[in-house]
Amino acid sequence: MAEFIEMIKWEKLITATQETIYMTTISVLATFILGLSLGMLLFLTDKGNMWENKFSNTFIAAIVNVFRSIPFIILIVLLIPFTKLLLGTILGANAALPALIIGAAPFYARMVEIALREIDKGVIEASQSMGANHSQIIFKILIPESLPALISGITVTAISLVGFTAMAGVIGAGGLGHFAYLEGFQRNNPVVTLVATVAILIIVFIIQFVGDYFTKKTDKR
């Protein structure tokens, strides 16, 4: 047992865990805002909705589909020039954020669009007949009615982002993925890799628990 404990560099593990939590938290918040905006635009500009506009809908859908389809590890490489221009470096936790956000936001946008489509159109029509303006319909009808699905969707996205941070770590973004690769794989130390994996699983379980709790809390059914 003592040997097992000595094989793990605890300070580096704690730092790596903090970096993973930091990357996940920032990217989840940004993904929620950007994904919600894109998903809302996809829904509202679609046929039969308040801001119906075929060109805008097709353009936004194309952007979402393109970035949603690119494998994350390739996206990181493609965004290296942009990341370097924006942050001046391609290493560290902050350098992973552009790729994490751009990779996850389109995925969440589609989940938002699906959640909004499930709302009974009769509720929207009733609010329009009562004189509600567009902003009132969005913030008092669409978002509240779809909130459980939105929370469930961001929970799934957050768990995916934890996995993305691990992939980003392999090319120097820091976090538990970087720790497992550098201290575990490259140094032929499977114990470190195992501990890093357990740490990632604990983060995922916590995210899932919190997401499930708030989904049930906001579900009116």
Image (tube, helix red, strand yellow):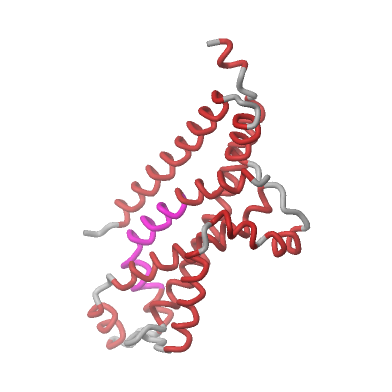
Q: Residue furthest top?
A: 2
What is the magenta segment's predominant secondary structure? helix
Q: Give the side of residue 116 with respect to residue 16, left or right.
A: left
Residue 111 screen position, x and y as percent: 38, 64
Q: Residue at x 34, y 47 (%)?
A: 213
110 on left or right of 169: left
Q: Left or right? Give the position of 27 relative to 111.
A: right
Q: Quadrant of the C terminus?
A: bottom left
Question: Which picture quadrant has residue 46?
Answer: bottom left
* 192 drawn magenta: no
Q: Position of residue 203 (x, y in %)?
A: 48, 39
Please state the horizontal and vertical placement of residue 73, each as a whole percent of the image: 57, 54
In this rendering, is residue 5 above or below 208? above
Q: Quadrant of residue 180?
A: top right
Relative to 58, residue 30 above or below: above
| Residue shown at the point (48%, 77%) measured from the top left | 62
Q: Between 16 and 32, which is closer to the camera in this rendering?
A: 16
Residue 151, quarter of picture: bottom left
Furthest-right residue in this view = 88
Which residue is at 45% across, 48% downward?
Answer: 159
Q: Residue at x 50, y 37 (%)?
A: 200
Which stretch did the figure color magenta?
139-158
Residue 155: in magenta span: yes
Question: Taking 65 as reference, is 88 above or below it?
Answer: above
- Give how far across and how far down residue 107 sits, in percent: 45, 63
Horizontal relation, residue 79 to residue 125: left or right: right
Residue 14 vs residue 55, the one in the foreground: 55
